[in-house]
Amino acid sequence: MLVAALLSVACASSASAQSFLDRLKGAAEKAVEKKTEEVIDGALSGQPAEPAPPPAQPMQVPKLKVGTSSGGRNCGALGTTCADGMNNLVACMNQADARHYGELLAPALQRKLDAGIFTAGTREDLEFDIAAVKAAGAPPYGKVKAADPSKPHRYLSWLTPQEQADIMNDSNRYSTALQKECNEKYARF
């Protein structure tokens, strides 16, 4: 703030501004000379200068053994060096996909196919969708691979809205119970 006040007073005219800057430069040069002389005098006197700070040491992070999800291996403090810390939890939760696709949705579609009310072309489409749903319900679990990318959920169109709702309700109840069980067993929260 002092410099700003001095600049505002000194800048009243351009001649006085240049004079002010010259004086400021001279004061800075004198301060540097004085500090240089102090350093030289200290070096010639034989007395040690201020001790230099010790070099920084890297922080040592303790390695902790992570529980059974990493097989008791040394995976670092947060398991960051082992990328498989969630495998058991994920494998446990995959049971939800197996049930939704393999035990609920695929049999419902199969019942539609067994009813036999479809033409040959439609029957082939339904058979393809049943196979895709069964594949999604088996390892490696994933999404249903649609025959027609413009209709990714065609497999659901074979079911009535009530059948879809019943399957979703059953699947959600199972998933909620499974999530609680898997979290208690593997996530410990």
Image (spheres, rainbow, N blue to C red):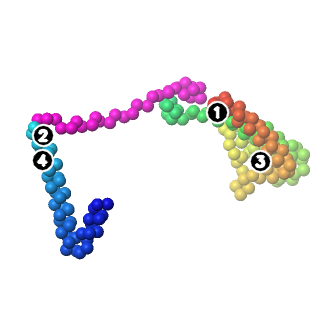
What number is the disc on residue 37?
Answer: 4
Q: Is residue 124 visible?
A: no
Q: Secondary structure at mark 2?
A: helix
Mark found first going from the N terminus, 4 or 2: 4
Residue 93 rendering spot, x and y as whole percentages: 68, 36
Residue kind at label 4, given as amino acid type: Glu
Q: Nearer the viewer, mark 1 or mark 3?
A: 1
Q: Nearer the viewer, mark 1 or mark 4?
A: 4
Per the image, the residue denoted by label 3 is 129
What number is the disc on residue 189?
Answer: 1
Mark found first going from the N terminus, 1 or 4: 4
Q: Which residues are magenta?
A: 46-74
Mark found first going from the N terminus, 3 or 2: 2
Tell me, yes or no, whether the highlighted magenta stretch contains residue 48. Answer: yes
* Residue found 85% across the figure and 47% down from its top: 163
Per the image, the residue denoted by label 2 is 43
Could you tell me how far apart the alpha carbons at marks 2 and 1 are, in whole angstroms? 64 Å
Residue kind at label 3, given as amino acid type: Asp
Asked if residue 46 lies left or right of residue 20, the reply is: left
Residue 161 rendering spot, x and y as whole percentages: 84, 51
Q: Secondary structure at mark 3?
A: helix
